[in-house]
Amino acid sequence: MPRIFCETALQSGASLGLPPAAARHVQVLRMQPGDALTLFDGRGGEYTATVERMGRSDVQVLVGDHDAVEREAAREVHLALGMPANERMDWLVEKATELGAASIQPLLMQHSVLRLAGERALKKQAHWQSIAIAACEQCGRNRVPQIHAVATLDAWLSSPNAAESKFVLSPAAASTLDARTGAGSVCVLSGPEGGLAPAEEEAAVAKSFLRAGLGPRILRAETAPLAALALTTLAR
């Protein structure tokens, strides 16, 4: 049964016109009146639904029962990362969503190849958010991770961070991430191609980030945050 994200708040028994993105999804699937689907609005759980009417540009559905099922990771993990270039960031957002990331913060760093600002940065943020939504539809998550606006590392480090444990990935770290992860929410900071500059790593440490490694090999900019995410969501 197709799973579709609906940004409009859902309620059992409601007859609802789907918002444009959800309506287009139903139309692309060539669904017809009477067909069943699953809807989720990011507020928890999911709903059964039935297509009532297919218009040329609109879709009406009848919202059915709510199922409070959740498929979130046991630990809330937030990724902050130097954006890898080209399609690698798209791939990273998709896989991080599947692995259970609670949020993703794209960062501009000294060694960043991809440099975004202004309208281009806003368009990329919206694009990555749509990738996260599609990944949730595919993998069964009912809560969509937030893709934050692109920020500089300095600006982000100066903003509040409520994570209970904070780590900066560093090849020179004495301990690996799985051995350093405490209980509660986690924030992991990872560099772009070329890694964090020494001054950037020191700035993170000055903000109470602990250095942590991922083993003896040097991982790519799009691989390291995913490895860290898998370790921290699975750690007990």
Image: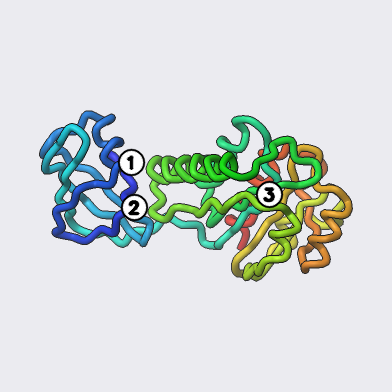
Residue picked out by circle 1: 21
Residue 4 x %, y % = 31, 44
Would residue 143 be found to the left or right of residue 191 on screen? left
Question: Which label's residue is closer to the chain start, 2 or 3?
Answer: 2
- Using the numbered discs, state the Cα–Cα distance from disc 2 to disc 1 in whole angstroms: 9 Å
Q: Is 16 above or below relative to 124? A: below
Question: Which label's residue is closer to the chain start, 2 or 1?
Answer: 2
Instruction: Give the quarter of the image for residue 57.
Output: top left
- Using the numbered discs, state the Cα–Cα distance from disc 1 to disc 3 in whole angstroms: 27 Å
Residue occupying image coordinates x 62% and y 70%: 162
Residue occupying image coordinates x 18% and y 52%: 16
Residue picked out by circle 2: 7
- Using the numbered discs, state the Cα–Cα distance from disc 2 to disc 3 in whole angstroms: 26 Å
Residue occupying image coordinates x 52% and y 41%: 123
Identified by mark 1, the residue type is Ala
Dot 2 and dot 1 residues touching (CB under 8 Å): yes
